Each structure stands twice: as structure tokens, then as C-alpha cells.
Image (cartoon, helix red, strand yellow):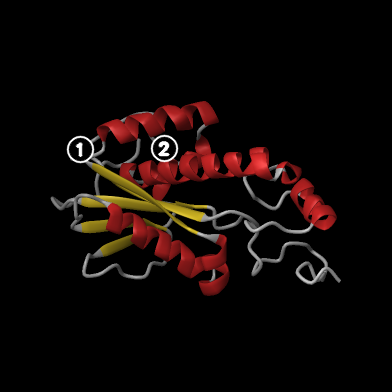
Amino acid sequence: MLKSSFGSNQLEAGCDEAGRGPLAGPVVAAAVILPKNFVHNELTDSKKLSQKQLIQMEALIKKEAKAYAVAEVSPREIDEINILNASFLAMHRSILALNVRPDLLLIDGNRFKAYEDIPHECIVKGDAVYMSIAAASILAKTHRDRLMFEAAKNYPEYGWQTNVGYPTKAHREAIRKHGITPLHRKSFRLLPEQMDLFTGS
């Protein structure tokens, strides 16, 4: 079972992101403040849940959380500031959007850029350790998946309805055949071979 808190009496917000690795789409982050001593047996890292379980847990988190927020950083912004900084920015935006100010941030991963004067703790694989981080991972993933499912309607060739922008073989073949969309991250290596996708040459 995941831990319900870091062990302090402070108001804790778990933070996580989804979408650092894809070739297309935004990076999305969520911040979640759960009630003190909140426990749920099925709440865990989003990567371990089926699509049905993700939707069920998303509804539970939104119902039970003291506060939550989800934020995006666009592909264009990712290209401008790089994916690591974009991940930090997405987390910052989600924290800013909370209607309750936390006393402590629990960050999934080993790096973070401090947000204002709020202390933070970085926890590697934190979404498999703390309930609030797991909850944030679920909200970030379900939000991002919906964005990519919707985008797939406008760009059906790329298979985003199944790969949600990640670099599958089919996705890369579609890029090779059809070129890129406004949702592709131009700063990423979209194809294995050296190829000028942007001038058409």
C-alpha cells in the first residue's frame, strides 16, 4: 500500500507529469492535495492501471481531493525551452492553479525547479510510493490521453488514438509518409535517420 503522507503535519501536494517522451502533443502535469490520512487500496502509479481503472480512479480523486489542478505546456513551448524545463513549467502551472496553497510539494522524480518559497521533496518513482503523487500521475495521464484522443480525430494517420503521441513504429512511419503536424515537437528526433522534415527536402 502507498503512503498517505510524507510524515509531516503540513498540507502536501503531490505533483507528477505525463508526456515527456512522446513525439507529439503537450506535456501535462497535475498537482493533488488529498485529505490527511487518505487511503485507497487501488490508488497506485498510473502506469499500472488499465484504461477503465484510470477513469474510475480519476473520478474518485476529483471527488475526494481537497484540491487538484491540471496544466499543459504546448509542443511549441517544449521546443523553445526543452522538455525538462517544460515539465517543470507544467508542474508550476498546476501548483499555481490549486485553490489551496500547499505547505510542501512531493515531486515525482529526482529533479525539480523550486516553486516560489514552497519547500519540495523529490522522490524517485514517487508515484509508486505516495498516494498524492500517484493521484497526480493519474490526473495528468487521463487528461493528456483525452487531448491526444481528440487530436487523433483531426490527424488520424498517426495512430494517436492508441499511441497518444509516443514514438511507435507506426507513428514514425506516418511521419515519414505524411510529414509533421503542428502538434509534433520539432526539437525531438522524430525519425531515426537524419532527414529534413521541416523544409520538405
Element marked by disc 2: loop
Count neighbours of disc 2 (C-alpha within 10 A) and say few if under 14, some if 14 to 19, many if 20 or more. Answer: many
On residue 44, which mark appears? 2
Q: Position of residue 93 (x, y in %)?
A: 35, 59
Q: Answer above or below: position of 111 versus 32.
A: below
Drawn side of residue 154 relative to residue 169, left or right: left
Which image quadrant for residue 3? top left
| Residue at 66%, 43% in the rendered image | 154
Q: Position of residue 138 (x, y in %)?
A: 43, 41
Which image quadrant for residue 114? bottom left
What's the amino acid at mark 2? Thr
Q: Position of residue 166 (x, y in %)?
A: 65, 50
| Residue at 38%, 67% in the rendered image | 112
Comparing 184 with 126, the one in front is 184
Per the image, the residue denoted by label 1 is 37
Residues at marks 1 and 2 touching, judged by CB atoms closer than 8 Å: no
Disc on the earlier residue, 1 or 2: 1
Task: Tell me if I can see residue 20 in this picture.
Answer: yes
